[in-house]
Image (cartoon, rainbow, N blue to C red):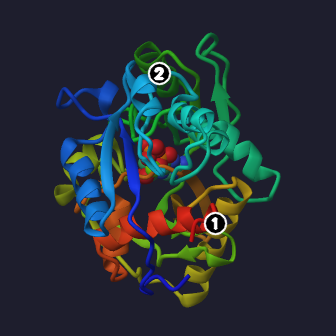
Amino acid sequence: MAINEKDDYPPLKVGLFYNVKHKSGSDEEAEYDSFSTIEAIKRALEKRDNTVVLFEEDSSLLEKIKDANIDIAFNIAEGKGGRGREAQIPAILNLFGIPYTGSDETTLCIALDKALTKRVLATYKIKTPKYVLVPAKNPTRPVNLTYPVIVKPNAEGSSKGISDVAIAKNHKELTEVLKINIEKYRQDMLVEEYIHGREFTVGLIGNGKDLFVFEPMEITYKRPTQENFCVYSYSVKQNYEKYVDYVCPPDLPKAQIEKMKTVAANVFKILSCSDFARIDFRLDENGSLFFIEVNPLPGLAPNYSDFPMLANFCGVDYDTLINKIMVSALKRIEKI
Ligand SMILES: Nc1ncnc2c1ncn2[C@@H]1O[C@H](COP(=O)(O)OP(=O)(O)O)[C@@H](O)[C@H]1O
Ligand SMILES: [Mg+2]
């Protein structure tokens, strides 16, 4: 797919499925969208003459879907509770036979489990940092990793739990970080070797032979975010102007850019992602590329989220991006 080609599709009745933030600053709702994002997606779809019906994920959803008669869903819902939460809306839409944009329930479940994703990718020799999954029930066992390590809740997005205490330089610090995070998140913790080096994120849109990979966007740090470490944490994302710059295309040899784009496309295919996704990488000081995580439901906040930002760097404005996602889904389900 040429990213700037004009794709036409007939006007549709689109259901926009989401979870919206009700309390500002709540960690529990950190993954949820603000209403301005929902409005921006709605506006972008309406510009193409679609009728957009809003569906917040709540307990009255099933009743509402039944009578809504929608052609397709634009899904950005993060879901409520548990490792499979992002699968809730796709699974419900499957039940009603309604097609939707983005990855299916299985891909969303796997990707939300960071350790499971790493295990799948390891079978395809995709390099990811060495790790140990520490069970919430028995966190005291020593880990056979080289310090420093980074500790992340295994099934959270939006850098939840990745606060200023997430790096551990020795076993004692690790024990403390694990204790705090397990108490807070009540789930297994992914402990990974910390990769010193540069950080990139790669956006993808489309499917199969039409998969388009954007130029990588580098996240460069203006200053370390803690001691000598740079972590694109929740608080750093919230205060991004203070800590980071975004550079796209990055200052990297062409061969390295191509390699990163190829690995990103492979990860997209291995995990059976659909329509769009964003993949994070680190490049260490010896030039080794490490997969960090895949976001099959990347944030779409205009002027804030990484995906619209990197698209914009590549000349794709917000409304075009939203409609490209829709076009990718319509092509995939053979509606256009
Ligand atoms: N193994 C690692 N080495 C170095 N930094 C890491 C590593 N894993 C994560 N990070 C840092 O933490 C940030 C958030 O981690 P990530 O796995 O992408 O979780 P999230 O779902 O919160 O985006 C990354 O963008 C990166 O800055
Ligand atoms: Mg990330």
What secondary structure is marked by label 1? loop
Q: Quadrant of the C terminus?
A: bottom right
Q: Is residue 269 left or right of residue 24?
A: right
Task: Kindly indicate the quadrant of the structure image that contains residue 199.
Answer: bottom left
| Closer to the camera in the image, 100 or 18 | 100
Q: Would you name the residue on which mark 1 appears?
A: 334
Identify the image quadrant of the N terminus: bottom right
Residue 223, position as x, y percentages in the image: 25, 59
Determine whether label 1 and label 2 are within 8 Å by CB. no
Vertical order, 27 against 277 (above or below)? above
User: Which residue is at a point 47% across and 21% down the rendered structure image?
Assistant: 81
- Looking at the rendered structure, which numbered label has been put on residue 174? none
> Residue 287, position in %: x, y?
60, 73
- Reading the chain from its start, which is encountered first: label 1 or label 2? 2
Q: Amino acid at mark 2?
A: Gly
Mark 1: give few (<14), some (14-19) or many (20+) Cα within 10 Å.
Answer: few
Q: Which residue appears at 65% of the width and 30% of the height?
A: 133
Respond yes or no on whether mark 1 lies under 8 Å from ligand 2.
no
| Residue 67 vs residue 62, the one in the foreground | 67
Residue 182 image offset from top left, x and y in percent: 48, 17
The Cα atoms of the two marked residues, 1 and 2, are separated by 33 Å
Give the residue at the far top of this rendering. Answer: 137
What residue is disc 2 on? Answer: 81
Using the rendered view, name the quadrant where residue 234 is placed: top left
Residue situated in front as seen by the camera: 276 or 138: 276
Tell me which residue sits at (31%, 51%) in the image.
Answer: 52
